[in-house]
Structure formats: structure tokens, C-alpha cells
Image (cartoon, rainbow, N blue to C red):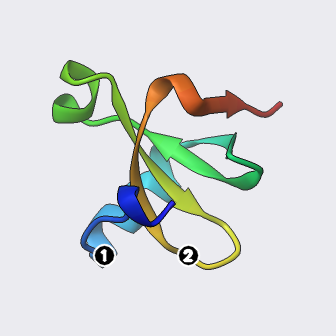
Amino acid sequence: MNEYKIKQTTFIKNTVKAFGQSAKVMGIKGIYAQGKYEANNNLALFLDNKTDTLYRVPMNIIKECA
């Protein structure tokens, strides 16, 4: 997951928490959301619940959780 890690900002983390949906990426549970840039490039912002780390991952590796 280190190749997907991006700069951490409190604003982005809070936005993902507020508007995100629960998901699982490579066995890691978290929350994901898309901004304009991510939607245009088929990416998503993923916030790991356990470590509170922010990643930008491809949409095809995200599995939504109910």
C-alpha cells in the first residue's frame, strides 16, 4: 500500500470521514470517497481505519462493505 500513500492533511481526512463509504482494500478496512480529480482518473481516496493513513487507490481494488 505504500505506493498509494499520499500527503496527509486534516482537511482531506475529515472530508473523507464525512462523505465516505465503508470499504475494504487489500484486506484493510476503511472509508473511501471520490473528488473531482479522482473521479476523472478512476481513483478514490481511501482512509485506513486502523492507522488513519490516507491513500489514493484505483477504484478496481475497492470492495464496498455493507
Q: Which residue is rendered at x = 38% and y = 56% of the image? A: 4
The quarter of the image holding the C terminus is: top right
Assign a secondary structure to mark 2.
loop
Where 59 falls versus 49 (above or below)?
above
Q: Which amino acid type is marked by label 1?
A: Gln
Residues tagged 2 and 1 counted as in contact (Cβ below 8 A): no
Q: Which amino acid type is marked by label 2?
A: Asp
Residue 53 is situated, as x and y percent measured from the top left of the image, at 49, 72
Assign a secondary structure to mark 1.
loop
Displayed quadrant of residue 28: bottom right
Decide if residue 66 is on the left or right side of residue 33: right
In terms of sequence position, does the residue under pointer 2 or pointer 1 come before the other?
Answer: 1
Displayed quadrant of residue 33: top left
Camera-side residue: 1 or 19? Answer: 1
Where 48 falls versus 61 (above or below)?
below
Q: Which residue is rendered at x = 32% and y = 22% of the image? A: 42
Cα distance, mark 2 to mark 1?
9 Å
Residue 37 is situated, as x and y percent measured from the top left of the image, at 16, 33
Displayed quadrant of residue 49: bottom right
Residue 17 is situated, as x and y percent measured from the top left of the image, at 51, 57
Decide if residue 1 is on the left or right side of residue 63: left
Decide if residue 47 is on the left or right side of residue 30: left
Outermost residue toward the front in this view: 3
Residue 34 is situated, as x and y percent measured from the top left of the image, at 36, 35
Label 1 CA crowd tier, 10 Å (few <14, some 14–19, many 20+): few
Outermost residue toward the right in this view: 66
Residue to which mark 1 is pinned: 8
Decide if residue 31 is on the left or right side of residue 18: right
Q: Which residue is rendered at x = 27% and y = 75% of the image? A: 9
Residue to which mark 2 is pinned: 52
Label 2 CA crowd tier, 10 Å (few <14, some 14–19, many 20+): few
